[in-house]
Image: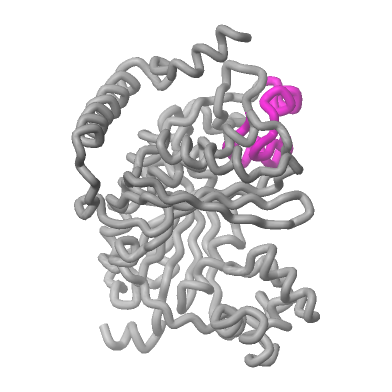
């Protein structure tokens, strides 16, 4: 054991499922393997938009997230369009992580479709590359889920490595390779650097990861605070963070955002994107068994102006529909009508569902009891008859008006 540790040092894997939602659908129906597949908010209606696409749809036909369905079908007349099934995605995600745990208990889920493994002390299965190959082949064989894997001495480098070859890639990124491989890249391609941070760095003449690595610590600290120092360390290949199986329980925020492929002003498109984001946030909250009373949205306009707005409600939530409704409330009050390029939803200050304390007056008690029964009934009906069996009265009213 000590000999293998000395031979390889610390070894971290980042496992990232490729086009996860679309891959789950193909896993359920293997006949779709060689076809262009998209997951869309409402496949039966012309006004629907693409929420996810497999690599065939992306690479062969140029289909992208938020593309109107009519345009996607125009580009690919034989396109397979599927409605999202978040029960399926959550179930497969759980099976992916159960499989990964057979290699090491030192596993940290980062989201529904990616996670870190510390395999430093797990070489009974072979070399790091051999273990990565076993994971990749095993997930493909047992769950039919393709993954890309980064192998590195720390979490940051492993994450950067897993993004380099998709789909079904395995990339080794050593610290000594950082100057040659990472430093020439634009700083915005660095994990942890968003558009806002990239602009600040560009404004002081830092355009590449290498320039960030060589920048004066005091300048970065003045510009970005402690995050500036942290980014400089990572640009030099340094990241001391451990892989922590308990990290998910420590999270104070659970959020998702998506950069739209075009500037969007149509409210219906924005609402479909918000609904998908709410589903994703809800899934992760359920995985971690947490709730939140505060929902925050992020809006980035086409001119890169970014705003975040939040509101705290009396009762905590976890269900996607409730998160969605709160996000819609915020969007309608704070969107100025200008074109939007990015939307995000974050559940702020999440806490364990078991620790949730409400003001249980008679109204709230009865309301919660009814909702709990309602959610359970809806789930049973959807499992038996499909997602479309349940529609809210307001949706029926809108259809009747049309």
Q: Nearer the viewer, residue 231 or 399?
A: 399
Magenta range is: 49-77
Q: Nearer the viewer, residue 243 or 366?
A: 366
Q: Is residue 366 left or right of residue 162?
A: left
Q: Position of residue 313 (x, y in %)?
A: 39, 46
Answer above or below: position of 267 versus 95.
Answer: above
Answer above or below: position of 52 versus 7.
Answer: above
Count of marks placed on residues: 0
Q: Nearer the viewer, residue 233 or 252?
A: 252
Q: Position of residue 286 (x, y in %)?
A: 32, 46
- Quarter of the figure with residue 10: bottom left
Q: Is residue 251 left or right of residue 223?
A: left
For the point 35% across and 15% down, which residue is it? 385
Q: Nearer the viewer, residue 278 or 129?
A: 278
For the point 66% across and 43% down, which residue is it? 335
Q: Is residue 265 left or right of residue 364?
A: right
Q: Is residue 82 magenta?
A: no
Residue 167 visible in the snapshot: no
Tell me how the rendering is colored: one colour
Q: Is residue 67 magenta?
A: yes
Q: From the image, which quarter does the C terminus lie in? A: top right
Answer above or below: position of 266 versus 357.
Answer: above
Q: Position of residue 252 (x, y in %)?
A: 38, 62
Q: Position of residue 172 (x, y in %)?
A: 53, 71
Q: From the image, which quarter does the N terminus lie in? A: bottom left
- Quarter of the figure with residue 56: top right
């Amino acid at each position: 054991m000590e000999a293998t540790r000395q031979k390889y040092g610390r070894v971290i894997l980042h496992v990232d499922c490729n086009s996860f939602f679309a891959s789950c659908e193909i896993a359920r129906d293997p006949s779709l393997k060689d076809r262009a597949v998209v997951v869309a908010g409402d496949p039966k209606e012309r006004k629907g938009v693409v929420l996810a696409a497999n690599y065939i749809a992306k690479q062969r036909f140029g289909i992208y997230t938020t593309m109107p369905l009519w345009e996607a079908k125009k580009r690919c007349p034989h396109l397979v369009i599927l409605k999202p099934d978040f029960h399926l995605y959550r179930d497969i995600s759980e099976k992916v992580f159960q499989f990964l745990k057979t290699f090491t208990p030192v596993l940290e889920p980062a989201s529904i479709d990616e996670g870190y493994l510390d395999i430093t002390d797990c070489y009974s299965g072979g070399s790091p590359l051999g273990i990565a190959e076993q994971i990749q082949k095993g997930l493909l064989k047992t769950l039919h889920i393709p993954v890309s894997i980064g192998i590195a001495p720390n979490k940051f480098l492993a994450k950067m490595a897993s993004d380099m070859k998709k789909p079904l890639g395995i990339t080794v990124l050593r610290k000594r390779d950082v100057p040659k491989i990472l430093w020439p890249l634009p700083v915005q391609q660095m994990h942890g650097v968003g558009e806002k941070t990239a602009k600040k760095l560009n404004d002081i003449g830092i355009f590449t990861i290498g320039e960030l690595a060589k920048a004066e610590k005091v300048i970065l600290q003045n510009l970005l605070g402690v995050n500036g120092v942290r980014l400089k360390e990572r640009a030099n290949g340094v990241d001391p963070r451990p892989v922590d199986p308990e990290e998910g329980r420590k999270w104070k925020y659970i959020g998702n955002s998506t950069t739209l492929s075009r500037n969007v002003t149509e409210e219906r498109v924005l609402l479909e994107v918000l609904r998908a984001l709410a589903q994703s946030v809800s899934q992760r909250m359920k995985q971690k068994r947490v709730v939140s009373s505060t929902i925050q949205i992020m809006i980035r306009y086409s001119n890169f102006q970014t705003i975040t707005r939040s509101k705290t409600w009396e009762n905590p939530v976890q269900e996607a529909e409730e998160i969605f409704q709160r996000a819609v409330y915020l969007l309608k009050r704070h969107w100025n009508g200008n074109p939007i390029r990015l939307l995000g939803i974050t559940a702020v200050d999440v806490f364990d569902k078991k620790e949730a304390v409400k003001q249980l007056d008679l109204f709230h008690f009865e309301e919660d009891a009814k909702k709990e029964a309602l959610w359970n009934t809806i789930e049973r009906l959807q499992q038996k008859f499909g997602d479309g069996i349940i529609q809210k009265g307001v949706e029926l009213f809108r259809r009747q008006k049309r």
